[in-house]
Image: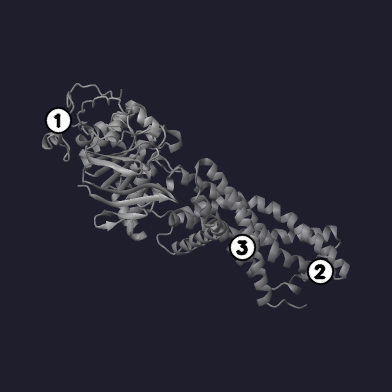
Amino acid sequence: MASTATRVLAPVGAAGKLFAFGLDVGRALFRRPFQLREFLQQAWFIASVTIIPTALVAIPFGAVIALQVGGLIKQFGAQSFTGSASVLAVVQQAGPIATALLIAGAGGSAIAADLGARKIREELDAMMVLGIDPIQRLVVPRVLACMLVAFFLNGMVTVVGVAGGYVFNVVLQDGTPGAYLASFTALAQLPDLWVGLLKALVFGFIAAIVASYKGMNAGGGPKGVGDAVNESVVITFLMLFVVNFVMSTIYLQVIPPKTG
Amino acid sequence: MGVEIKVNNLTKSFGKQLIWGDVSLTIPAGEICVMLGPSGTGKSVFLKTLIGLLKPDQGSIIIEGTDIASCSEKELYEIRKLFGVLFQDGAMFGSMNLYDNVAFPLREHTKKSESEVRAIVMEKMDLVGLLGAEDKLPGEISGGMRKRAGLARALVLDPEIVLFDEPDSGLDPVRTAFLNQLIIDLNAQIDATFLIVTHDVNTARTVPDNIGLLYHRHLAMFGPREMLLSSEEPVVRQFLNAQRVGPIGMSEEKDADELAAEEGQELPPLPPIPLQQEPSSGVPRRSQRAPGAWCRDNGVTPPPGSFDENMSMTIGS
């Protein structure tokens, strides 16, 4: 009986530990001294592993949305709103999601692998023994770097996605450039941009927290590190889609859509 | 001068499995202690508990009036500044070269200028014989060098307590002998409290002032070196003399019938107690006792041939 109960409750415990870790990081965010060097190094590193894949993903992403939405809208006879619709889709959904997937897949896995390797080599223990909190020294710079890079990547995905949509709409679907550009502001509004950026920040935070948590709790030799990386990517993806759903719902409830 | 560590009724288990229970001992200030035990008796767990990396289930560890087992995170980070720890594989930071590794604690904890840092780092590197290897990455050097580099890093903040996690694992006998000499010389020089966790019997017989033996989930015995080396207690004499006859088996404990078969067997005589290794400077350490002093004070006759300058170090049957 007891073992069944513990087994059923184990995921709750794991979730609680992850949450507690997140709180620890949140508290350490404001503790001095701030590790500027580590932060810059990590930001540079994460950016370097994510920029090119993100750009490559963003072009087809924007194009697919343009094709899909463009086709659908044509059937409704509202071609003049194609630009607006694809901007909305890219800015609110495609941008943050594409960013998050790459931050988690490329940046997060690297963080989990790095911290996991440090964990099993006892480097983290050594650091704690030297009187240095690894959360403050290693995790906080990584979390902030992830958030910063996610923020900028989101901007890049948005621009590249909208540009891709423009090219496909104008070249392949015989849309008029003027209508595409002019309809930008017809349905889209400034808060759409803000929520897209906010999502990117939150996703970057989640990806870094999960990756750091899994990495710092890797165990059982090299295999443990591999498992930690694998788990961190899967858990991050799951969490990102759920959080995206929640944030989108709240946003659509709170901010009234612009009409015409 | 080192700091005393008082351990009271310490108990630790992982889940339902008890690692060891009711461990009480006092590690005297400035002395060298060795914690021995068969593989898998939780020696490393004991060491990690002492520095607060693992929380014990019960008991207390008092260092300078602070209980490591129950103090706050903040106090823990403060008290850890008294410690220097040499981890099994050195635990060097893989992304930094040896110089930056050794300089790391100084840069994090002190406001020393780069030239002061350089002077201290070079002094410690010289101490462990690693001058000239500062620019190497931890991945590029041998295990023995990594250990010595780890030792240099552990010493850089002038610790009051130095803990060694299996300093001799994976080293050849010659390097082990050099490392042991280094430990003795260091103790003579900095007077800190040393605790060495190992299962190497030669180290245990010649290096420490005190020996402790963890066996079968408890502390079998803790006391001066000569007390354990002259002890007739079956577990202690079996382990310290690396014999097969005795209560310790290949697995955790011997089967009952195996023990019964050994019943009438004569235990081999205790081998002579070797001299304690001396500092290479020839000046005795502050905590060093004269050979045979404990035996004389307690009316114990040491095994014949003990404390002979030229005795062979070979032990076992």
User: Closest to the observer: B184 or B289?
Assistant: B289
Which chain does the residue under circle 1 lie in?
B
Residue B213 is situated, as x and y percent measured from the top left of the image, at 29, 39
Label 1 packing within 10 angstroms: few (<14), some (14-19), many (20+): few
- Please determine if labels 1 and 3 lie on a single subunit: no
User: Closest to the observer: B195 or A91?
Assistant: B195
Q: Which residue is found at the position 49% from the left and 51% from the top? A: A217
Residue B112 in view in this figure: no
Which chain does the residue under circle 2 lie in?
A
**What residue is pinned by disc 1?**
B301
- Decide if residue A254 is on the left or right side of residue A40: right
Camera-near label (2 vs 3) is 3
**What residue is pinned by disc 2?**
A179
Mark 1 secondary-structure assignment: loop
Separation of marks 1 and 3 at Cα, in angstroms: 77 Å
Tell me if residue A250 comes above or below residue A14 in the rendering.
below
Separation of marks 2 and 1 at Cα, in angstroms: 105 Å
Label 2 packing within 10 angstroms: few (<14), some (14-19), many (20+): some
Residue B151 is situated, as x and y percent measured from the top left of the image, at 33, 40
Residue B70 is situated, as x and y percent measured from the top left of the image, at 33, 59
Which chain does the residue under circle 3 lie in?
A
Q: Which residue is found at the position 64% from the left and 63% from the top? A: A242
Separation of marks 2 and 3 at Cα, in angstroms: 29 Å
Residue A238 location, quadrant: bottom right
Q: Earlier in the sequence, mark 2 or mark 3?
A: 2
Tell me if residue B308 comes above or below residue A130 in the rendering.
above
Mark 2 secondary-structure assignment: helix
**Which quadrant, please, contains the N terminus of chain A?**
bottom right
The reply to whether discs 2 and 3 touch (Cβ–Cβ < 8 Å) is no
**Which quadrant, please, contains the C terminus of chain A?**
bottom right
Mark 3 secondary-structure assignment: helix
**What residue is pinned by disc 3?**
A200
